[in-house]
């Protein structure tokens, strides 16, 4: 039986024809901050261009498998044109499967003649689509820079000369038992992704309640996804959004066309200097698109963002709360564990430590938890990533499943960005800056 996923309400819709109005820039800011996502309408790309792009891709995926495999199947992620089929075991213990075609698309003259020659009008129609959507991406990038209070020309030239990769996904219906059509939870490595979906099926994690929600499809709109490299540029102010696609089984084959925009292949992306200060220290190290591709081809399953986020050690406040939690959970301080910390709306009022579901009488004020004990503590926080909201929390229905296709021997652990298993403890703490952090320990 198919699970019913609630539709996410109030996803911002940006009217592209009003892009540089102050109110729209503000709306973009809120969209990126609160959802990592927005719809764009009135973008000016003719319906016929969009329909043609969907049609030529549908015709391409309809070609006999042998033909696509022979010419285009490759495991080399740096190949400018690549066809493949992905099957991963990560949804309700079943498999998720999709076919994809990846195309390098900028500068288009370098790549167009490598794109599929079948169907015969593929290059022409997809060439037009790629060029039109690129213009949209450049405009949106400027508006997003403005929404960060940066100059609209910040990185403009770099973006204009940057990479564009197109990922076309085909989600056919008949896949056999225990195989569902879809793409597993992930964030995009891009700065932004402009996504076109032929029918609904995209899900994002709603940051308000940390559950998967379905994104409705607005006729004629594009979906804009905040990617990892925008998280970096914004120094964590905007977080890349965790998303997946699980098309329903009654809509026929679903297609999506994702246009992923990055800077140049070897260009280093770093937090904008204006967004780094004492309050908000630089949280990411420099990285390039090539770094991402190398990670991808290494088959290491750690999410890219986790490889570039600086880690820091605990503050005394955090140490005390974690110690209290461990005791409440019946663990000793010498237990080794993994955990993640997430930031919530900074404007929220400061909160006291809330009692745990499984709490006994111990609290953070417990005298055995004086800060001086910190030096004696031997527990090893394996991964501490304050203010990382990549996996905002563990969505309930994901318990026992694998968000990033990572395998963990210990099913009681939550690896940062890795295997999500069960929620065993939760507490809320407020720091002096009113940052509300939810702490989830597994
Ligand atoms: O098919 C979709 O809606 C999502 C595809 C996606 O997330 C991707 O290609 O990165
Ligand atoms: Fe994606």
Image (cartoon, grey):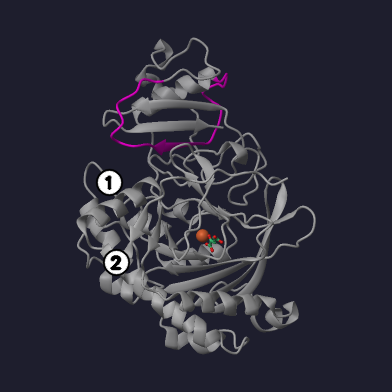
Q: Main secondary structure of the magenta part?
A: loop
Determine if residue 190 is in view: no
Range covered by the magenta-colored residues: 329-353
Q: How many marks?
A: 2
Is label 2 in contact with label 1 (beta carbons under 8 Å)? no
Residue at 57 percent of width and 63 percent of height: 298
Residue 429 placement: quadrant: top left
Q: Which is more toward the observer, 363 or 401? A: 401
Residue 76 placement: quadrant: bottom right
Residue at 47 percent of width and 83 percent of height: 127
Q: Residue furthest right?
A: 177
Element type where label 2 sits in the image: helix
Q: Decide: is 328 above or below 224.
A: above
Residue that badge 2 annotates: 17
Q: Decide: is 19 above or below 209.
A: below
Element type where label 1 sits in the image: loop
Q: Is residue 152 left or right of residue 422?
A: left
Q: Which is more toward the observer, 310 or 142? A: 142
Q: CA distance from mark 2 to mark 1?
A: 36 Å
> Quadrant where the C terminus lies?
top right
Q: Position of residue 306 (x, y in %)?
A: 46, 51
Q: Position of residue 334 (x, y in %)?
A: 54, 25
Q: Position of residue 34 (x, y in %)?
A: 37, 45
Residue that badge 1 annotates: 281
Residue at 69 percent of width and 77 percent of height: 62
Q: Is residue 26 left or right of residue 5?
A: left
Say if the magenta span includes residue 344: yes
Determine if residue 260 is in view: yes
> Quadrant where the N terminus lies?
top right
Q: Decide: is 371 above or below 124.
A: above
Q: Which is more toward the observer, 205 or 428? A: 205
Q: Residues within 10 Å of mark 1 (few under 14, many from 20)?
A: few
């Amino acid at each position: 039986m198919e699970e019913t996923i609630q539709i996410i309400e109030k996803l911002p819709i940006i009217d592209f024809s009003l892009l540089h109005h102050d109110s729209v820039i503000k709306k973009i800011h809120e969209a990126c901050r609160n959802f990592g996502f927005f719809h764009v309408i009135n973008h000016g790309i003719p319906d016929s261009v969009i329909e043609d792009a969907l049609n030529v891709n549908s015709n391409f995926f309809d070609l006999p498998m042998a033909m696509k495999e022979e010419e285009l199947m490759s495991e080399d992620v740096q190949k400018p044109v690549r066809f493949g089929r992905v099957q991963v075991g990560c949804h309700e213990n079943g498999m998720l499967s999709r076919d994809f075609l990846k195309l390098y698309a900028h500068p288009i003259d370098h790549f167009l003649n490598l794109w599929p020659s079948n169907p015969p009008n593929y290059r022409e129609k997809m060439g037009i689509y790629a060029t039109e959507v690129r213009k949209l991406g450049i405009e949106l990038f400027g508006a997003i820079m403005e929404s960060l209070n940066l100059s609209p020309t910040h990185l403009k030239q770099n973006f204009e000369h940057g990479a564009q990769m197109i990922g076309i996904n085909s989600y056919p219906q008949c896949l056999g038992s225990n195989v569902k059509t879809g793409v597993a939870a992930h964030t995009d490595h891009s700065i932004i992704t402009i996504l076109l979906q032929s029918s609904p099926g995209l899900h994002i994690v709603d940051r308000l309640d940390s559950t998967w929600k379905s994104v409705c499809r607005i006729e004629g709109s594009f979906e804009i996804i905040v990617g990892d490299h925008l998280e970096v540029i914004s120094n964590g102010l905007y977080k890349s959004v965790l998303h997946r696609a699980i098309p329903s089984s009654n809509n026929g084959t679903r297609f999506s066309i994702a246009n992923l925009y990055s800077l140049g292949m070897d260009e280093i992306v770093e937090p904008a200097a204006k967004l780094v200060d004492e309050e908000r220290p630089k949280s990411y190290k420099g990285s390039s698109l090539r770094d991402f591709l190398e990670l991808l081809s290494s088959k290491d399953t750690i999410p890219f963002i986790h490889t570039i986020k600086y880690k820091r050690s605990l503050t005394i406040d955090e140490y005390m709360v974690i110690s209290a939690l461990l005791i409440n959970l019946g663990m000793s301080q010498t237990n080794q564990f993994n955990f993640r910390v997430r930031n919530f709306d900074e404007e929220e009022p400061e909160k006291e430590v809330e009692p745990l579901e499984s709490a006994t009488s111990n609290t953070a004020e417990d005298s055995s938890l004086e800060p001086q004990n910190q030096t004696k503590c031997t527990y090893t926080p394996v991964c501490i990533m304050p203010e990382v909201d990549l996996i905002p929390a563990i969505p309930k229905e994901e318990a026992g499943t694998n968000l990033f296709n990572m395998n963990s021997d210990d099913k009681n652990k939550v690896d940062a960005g890795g295997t999500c298993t069960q929620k065993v403890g939760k507490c809320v703490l407020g720091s002096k800056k009113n940052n509300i952090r939810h702490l989830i320990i597994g």
